[in-house]
Image (tube, rainbow, N blue to C red):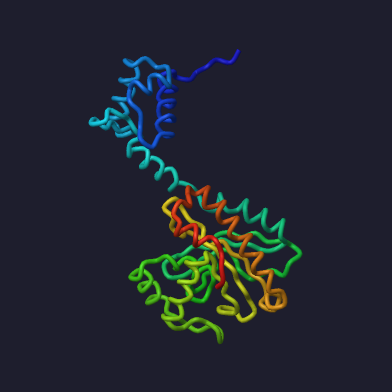
Amino acid sequence: MTKDYTVPAVQRTIQVLEILAASPSGFSLADLSRQTGIPKSSLFRILLTLDRSSVVHLDEARGTYSLGTKLIDWGNQALDKIDLKTITHPHLVRLANETRESYYVAVLDDYEVIIIDRADTPEMWRIVARLGNRSPVHATASGQVLIADLSADVLESVLSRGGLKRYTSVTITSVSRLAKRLKEVRETGYAVADAEYKPDLCVIAVPIRDYHGRSVAALMTALQSERAHRNKTIITGIIGTLKQEAASISRQLGFVAASPAVVGRNNGGKS
């Protein structure tokens, strides 16, 4: 027979916290005692201990208990420890196997974009994009996704350091044009950079968001521009695939799309 080494007092505490987590307005001592079956005297000591550590909060005017701010601190610390690449790589591998395309994850590093993860499919034309490769923010789909939500002063700082260098005949080299593009990215939830950095490359990227709703990474794929021009619907399909996968990754990072503004950004549209 397997011994039960669990601690009853800790089990009771967890039971109380789970009940409080399901209530936006909180419960009184009597309500919690009825729901848990814990005697009021024992329950009071548990709640008093939790209240003193800010794990629960007692509203003295209403006589109700709710979850405290300490849990937010603990939750944020746990989320900060999540390794992005550990989460993204299984998604990239599965996508590559299912769609026969290559997929990449990039992050913003100072004023450049750097690729931190990738997954390829053997039979396709391999895009030259090694791990650690750096590219400019203004001329790449991943960069445009990553800077779209930056405040005006931060964006100005990033652009002043990296500049708006021309790489091809269609590279965005003016602040006004870039501002217009970033507005489109915010509204549609994706970026398409066709021959803006490399003349034969069309790249599509979408944001991966953390628990604060920030764009912490870009999920992207790339195809030859000629292939994209021959089949216009392929980009629409890729956008849908990327958005769906990025939403799944973002949920694992703690993102909850509760805001209508954020949901609207993820609903698609024209670039």
Q: Position of residue 185 (x, y in %)?
A: 50, 69
**Most distant residue in the right direction:** 123
* Corner quadrant of residue 63: top left
Position of the N terminus, as image quadrant, is top right
Q: Position of residue 148 (x, y in %)?
A: 45, 68
Q: Residue at x 40, y 66 (%)?
A: 150
252 left or right, relative to 102: left
Q: Position of residue 144 (x, y in %)?
A: 49, 70
Q: Position of residue 250 (x, y in %)?
A: 52, 52
Q: What is the total number of numbered labels drawn onto the structure image?
A: 0
245 left or right, relative to 55: right
Whether residue 70 is situated above or below residue 44 in the rendered picture: below
Whether residue 111 is situated above or below residue 81 in the rendered picture: below
Between 145 and 159, the one nearer to me in the picture: 145
52 left or right, relative to 170: left
* Corner quadrant of residue 168: bottom right
Whether residue 36 is situated above or below residue 262 in the rendered picture: above
Whether residue 238 is situated above or below residue 140 in the rendered picture: above
**Most distant residue in the top direction:** 1
Q: Residue at x 53, y 47 (%)?
A: 252
Q: Residue at x 53, y 68 (%)?
A: 142
Position of the C terminus, as image quadrant, is bottom right
* Corner quadrant of residue 14: top left
**Most distant residue in the bottom direction:** 169
